[in-house]
Image (cartoon, rainbow, N blue to C red):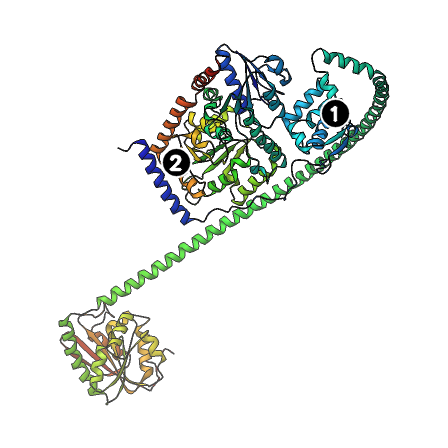
Amino acid sequence: MKIAMLVPGLRPHDAVSNDVRGMTAVLRGDGHEVAVFAPHAQGVDEVVRAPEELSAWLDHRDGVLVYHYCVGWDLALNAMRKTRARRVLRYHNITPPEFFTDWSPGYVSACEEGRRQLDDFAALGCDLYLGDSPYNNEDFISRGIGTERCEVLAPFHEIEHLLDLPAKSERIPQGSPLWLAVGRISPNKSYLELVDAFAASFPAARGDAPHLLIIGKLDPNLARYGEALQARIAAHGLEQHITILQDANGAELRAAFEHATAFVMLSKHEGFCVPLVEAMALGTPIVALASSAMPSTIGDAGIVWDCDEPPLIATTVARIGADAQLRSTLRERGRARFANTFANPVLGQRLRLIMQRFASP
Amino acid sequence: MDSTDDYFKRVKAEILAEAEIARMRAPLPRREPPPRGSTAPVIDVSGIERDRLDYRIAELTDENYIAFVEQAYRAILKRPGDEAGRNSQINHLAKGASKAEILGNLRWSPEGRRVGAHIRGLLPRYLLAKLSHVRGIGYLVDWCASFASLPVLLRHQRAADVMIASKIGELAQTLRACEERLGALEQRIERGTSQVEQRLRVIDERFGIVDTRLVGHTQTVDELRHYVYAGNHWLATVQRNFADLERIADEQRRRVDVLAAGVQETDAQIKAHSTRHARWSSEIAARLHAGARVLDLGSGDGAWLAGLAACGMNAAGVEPVSPLVKAAALQARPVAAGDPLAALERCSDGSLDAITLADASLCCGSASLLRLLDATARVLARPGWLFVRVEAEPRRADAGSGFDAERWRALLAAAGFEDLAVVEVAGGSLVAARCAGAVGQSVTGAQ
């Protein structure tokens, strides 16, 4: 069977790109002919074709076009409209534009356009809506798509590669407790609220001073949010207790997870949140806000709260730091959830099961 | 044993309770609103005319490559180009697509339709461009269109040749200007380097001077340090000497106290004294008139004075040992502290009717027998009496003059005293002698 993967772009260490490559590898392993179509690609070992070649390559009804939907892209919408092949909308979610209202008109415009296409794709009536999480599928179920055409498949990832890397801890702060947050520096990730929660850990801190390590890149288009984050850190007087690494590599990421007392995620919008799975795989206890897709990703492998009130988050991290049994329980649950639910081989089995519906023309 | 879920519920309940306590203990951290408009927006939105929807195609094709695509986004979609879309259109251009096709792609995209910009003359060009992509007929259409536009293309080509030649000329001129600028900069750098080296040499010289002065000051400081050490040593020696002096003084005070303690008497001794003194007092009273002025030298605790007073005499005493003076004061006896001879020398001539003297008191103070006799003769009225008490058990720790009663009698007789008598009582003798000669006359011939 010919399967085309259409994606806005491919780059290393990118969640959507990792998913494309993971799905491609599994499907090729099952004997399918898979090609990746993207307008640009850099730093990946995959032969990428131009999207304009798609209609010529996938020109019969037996094929499957999988579009990885994560931005507004007219070309892809048109391709999905015109193709004669069966259509799979792999939905990674698009951040609601209101998160960027105060920070970036460009992001607001792009996110508005991206979410506007939700209606277009719902109207297309694709053969399968394949969300990263049940939360993602809600966007289409609420637009009248039947649940029989919706499936959930967590994104493929590079975590097994991360587990094979030697930890490199020269730049990792040695504070205790060490709070860790991973993800691009963006308003929906609630880094301002994270700093507030971290600040609340100080009145009760005993012994070593706590430290917050943020690993994530700041898009220049969100520079104002970066400035606001620095201002919030300065307002709390925590410049010496918070480290932001924008250029951490895999070995440093691994060391950060291993040293961290807790992985704290207060994001208000996540389509899946791969860093949560990284924390599970590396045995880092998780403290998170029960927003968007995070509860379904975390399951029973972390402490999830309905609010991000600073004393509550600070107390939770302090408890994890002081309670060896709790740490051990969270670590075991995280590793078990990763092995049973999110390991790439498990995801591969799930993908095969889902793709069986396209086995016959 | 709790199940894991129960354990989790219990832990979460405990955390909630701890958080409530923490919330009460500390106020919530400041949550300030995000800065609005405090800094310039990062996205450049210049060139976006939101109210303008009518364009001529020539307005949008002036720019080339990326600038052309970005201008097209801003004019047709009223926003900056997003990365994916912009890259896609640039790829089209790189593959030979016409600008009209790019403008058409944007104009008739779903977003472009919603915006609804009108670009005069674009539609036929866009349709022609799209028609050229249709298999078979597209090639023919492309060929025909190209052939038809050959004269125009040739004009463009010639114009392009001229423009390129012009640009090359401008570039060469710019290059020359850059080279001149570079040469000037190199000269400035050389001059600057030379100045820096010169200043470094001056700094080196000044450091040398500072080093020399520093060595001189270091030597002075070393000398001062030796002086300070010597001064410290001298002060330590003085302190040691003062300590030795204080120790000797303390030792002497202790010795005086030991001596004073040595004169403490037993009850039997006190009774014997009382009996003896009563007898002697009556002997003295018999020689003097009532209210006679009597000075006792070496009065001890004043017990002797009390006996004289009881016999009607006006008696006072002098005692050099402080503890005995204090003991006399406690019993309200008129005993003054002081050296007996010094006290006697302060008395005026012929001012006393009698002087009583304990033989043992001669061992104390500055008393010398001859000076004592002289002073006695001077201060006694006429008739005036000297009484010397020689007691068998000495009341002081050491011996007195070493004379017995007979030797005192012989001594006083030799010194010119008259009416000598010895009153023997058990345990002691009282030697009585009347002073002869005129008032103020020395008995030894001394002045």
The residue carrying pointer 1 sits among few (fewer than 14), some (14 to 19) or many (20 or more) residues within 10 Å by Cα, namely: some
Q: Determine the residue positioned at 52% across, 44% down.
A: A237
State left or right for residue A56 relative to residue B301.
right
Q: CA distance from mark 2 to mark 1?
A: 67 Å
> Hey, which quadrant is residue B349 in on the image?
bottom left
Mark 1 = which residue? B123
State left or right for residue A129 relative to residue B360.
right
In the picture as drawn, the residue positioned furthest to the bottom comes out as: B289
* Amino acid type, residue under disc 1 in the picture: Leu
Q: Chain of mark 2?
A: A
Q: Is residue A242 visible?
A: yes
Q: Position of residue A109 (x, y in %)?
A: 62, 34
Picture layout, residue A174 above or below residue A232: above
How many labels were placed on the picture? Answer: 2
Picture layout, residue B348 above or below residue B26: below
Picture layout, residue A23 above or below residue A295: above
Q: Nearer the viewer, residue B188 or B358?
A: B188
Q: Nearer the viewer, residue A294 or A151?
A: A151
Q: Secondary structure at mark 1?
A: helix
* Amino acid type, residue under disc 2 in the picture: Gly
Q: Chain of mark 1?
A: B
Q: Nearer the viewer, residue A131 or A306?
A: A131
Same chain letter for marks 2 and 1: no
Q: Determine the residue positioned at 15% across, 72% down.
A: B269
Q: Position of residue B154 (x, y in %)?
A: 85, 17
Q: Determine the residue positioned at 23% across, 66% down.
A: B261
Mark 2 = which residue? A321
> Hey, which quadrant is residue B174 in on the image?
top right
Q: Position of residue A126 (x, y in %)?
A: 53, 22
Q: Position of residue B445 (x, y in %)?
A: 35, 79
